[in-house]
Amino acid sequence: MNEQERQEILSKAKEFFRSRVANNHIKNTRKLTDIRKFNINPFTLRYLSNFAFGDDTPENMAKALLYPRILGTSISTTFGTQLQYFCSEVLTSYASTTSGIDIEFIDAIDGRRKYCQVKAGPNTINHDDITTIINHFTAIKNLARTNRMTDFNPLYDCVVGVFYGTEEELSASYRTIAKDYPVFIGQDFWHRLTGDDNFYFDLINAFAEVAAEMDSTDLINRVLQRLTQQIRDAGL
């Protein structure tokens, strides 16, 4: 990958994060003015408010509801559901026409063509996903046999690429897959894809630059005020 291609991916990645992740995050935050958006457990809400903020005023209970959603669940869900768009819109030059495969690339480390399913993070698949992934790889093996692809070796060339994280963080589901097929994660995945050992960190910085553009402090305060009033009205 030359410098122009590298910068093109980083530029597209920023636009992807801005339009598909950050903007959706803002839309989802605006919806949280409605107390019905939360599954409130009255046995733990006051406890969490006291634990995190020192008392159980309506405002602090609202914080106990709102902050975990906007800083954790909401953004993680949005990022995961938009990942296929990242493959199709940002990694366009690696797009695969093979069923069940997200991208294909020449591994910068071993020089072999990889048929890759891209996943978000080290804990973003479950046990049922194992069968789906392995079935896709089995289909490629059968296709390679039919087409007499003599250079193809599924034990090396069918891989799972995990967008972020480290090998130590991989869940049991990924480790089950790794018994038969390589799982590349985080810096290793991006190095193999781009040939640049630092690309993973450049990508993180590109996303951080978008975040700096989108200071939503005022939005969060407005949502918090409305949620506080609903908690007060509900007598929680």
Image (cartoon, grey):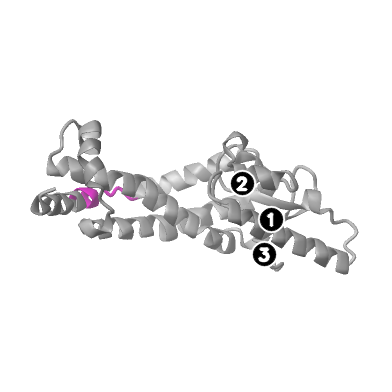
Which of the two discs, 2 and 3, labels the residue nearer the N terminus?
A: 3
Q: Amino acid at mark 2?
A: Ser
CA–CA distance in space, label 2 to label 3: 18 Å
Tell me the tag on residue 100: 3
- Residue 177 drawn at (x, y percent): 68, 48
Compute the Cα span from label 3 to label 1: 9 Å
Quarter holding residue 199: top right
Label 3 residue SS = loop
Classified by dominant secondary structure, the portion drawn in magenta counts as: helix
Element under label 2? helix
In the rendered image, residue 163, in percent from the top left (x then y), is placed at 57, 48
Amino acid type, residue under disc 3 in the picture: Gly
**At x 26% / y 60%, what residue is drawn?**
31
As helix, strand or loop, the secondary structure at mark 1 comes to strand
- Residue corresponding to mark 1: 116
Q: Which callout, 1 or 2, points to the residue nearer the camera? A: 2
Q: Is residue 112 visible?
A: no
Amino acid at circle 1: Cys
Give the foreground label among 3 and 1: 3
Q: Is residue 216 magenta?
A: yes
Mark 2: give few (<14), some (14-19) or many (20+) Cα within 10 Å: some
Q: Which residues are magenta?
A: 214-221
